Amino acid sequence: MTVRCFYALAAFAMGAALSAAADPADEWLAKARAFLGAESALNAVKSLHFEGSIDTVERVPDPTDATKLIERPLHLAIDIVFQKPMQQRQILRSDKVERTTTLDGFDGWERLSDRTGQTKPRIALLDLANIKRLRTTTVENLSFYAKQDQDSRQVRLLGDDTVDGVACVKLFFTHSNGITFLRTFDKSTGRLIKTEVQSGGEIREEGEMFVSGIRFPRKLLNKTVDGKVTVISFDKVTVGERFPAEIFAVPSL
């Protein structure tokens, strides 16, 4: 190799390094992470356990006219676990029914249980679309916007915006499976203002609690395109529990 070639390669490598370091999204990701907690606290998270409730509405037959549907309030208890590297379990529980949805790597399954004991539990494997969705939400919840998983997610700066009178910046998160999230952050603090999902819905956070040095919301408000709002309230968040492999493994069918 000639000296000229060596310097050319060195210059190319330095240029590539500078280009990577100059990613305009990095500054805002760092600010958003700093708002949530110190790097040491965020990087130490191996699992998250959320307990609380969900308030929404369900469509049921009109008791006076079976050909029509009416909406009525629905209150459910929730229990959600995320565990690295790629495990998730969601339990939704009413007085009569319990639905468990679980991810274990590339496997996903669901169990529907009758809490009255009148029928046996039903277990089914999840399709690919639902497995992709669960894998994506697992990464999103455990990464705290980090860019370590760039093989599965890219982040792009879209520019400035003003939301509720607050100067904001917009970042577009794209996963390799095609699932995307458009997030708007307060430019001055890094606080997440809202998240827009592919369906056109919007997620906002309310309140806050600190657990193991990390900031978590007390409520999530999920608003669909048609205006329907589902409220998820967290009573407790636990960081760092160790959950056994068997609670995620596909049960015998």
Image: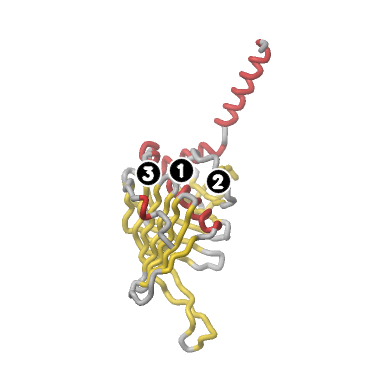
Q: Position of residue 144 (x, y in %)?
A: 44, 44
**Which disc number belongs to residue 171?**
2
Q: CA distance from mark 1 to mark 3?
A: 20 Å
Q: Which residue is mark 1?
A: 32
Q: Secondary structure at mark 3?
A: loop
Q: Nearer the viewer, residue 240 or 234?
A: 240
Q: Residue at x 52, y 47 (%)?
A: 168
- The secondary element bearing badge 1 is classed as helix
Marks 2 and 1, how far apart at CA: 11 Å
**Where residue 173 sits: x, y (%)?**
55, 47
Residue lying farthest to the bottom in this orientation: 64
Q: Are marks 2 and 3 in contact (CB under 8 Å)?
A: no
The residue located at (64%, 22%) in the rendering is: 12
Q: Earlier in the sequence, mark 1 or mark 3?
A: 1
Q: Amino acid at mark 3?
A: Lys
The amino acid type of the residue labelled 1 equals: Ala
Residue at image point 33% right, 46% down: 240
Is label 2 in a helix, a strand or a loop?
Answer: strand
Judged by depth in the image, the label closer to the viewer, 2 or 3, is 3
Label 2–label 1 contact, CB within 8 A: yes
Q: Residue furthest top?
A: 3
Q: Is residue 6 left or right of residue 93?
A: right
Question: In whole angstroms, how far apart are the C-alphas of marks 2 and 3?
Answer: 25 Å
Disc 3 residue crowd, few under 14, some 14–19, many 20+, Cα 10 Å: some
Q: Are marks 1 and 3 in contact (CB under 8 Å)?
A: no
Which of the two labelled residues, at mark 2 and mark 1, occupies the earlier sequence position? 1
Q: Earlier in the sequence, mark 2 or mark 3?
A: 3
What residue is shown with label 3? 46
Q: Position of residue 48 (x, y in %)?
A: 37, 50
Can you see residue 182?
Answer: yes
Q: Position of residue 222 (x, y in %)?
A: 48, 61
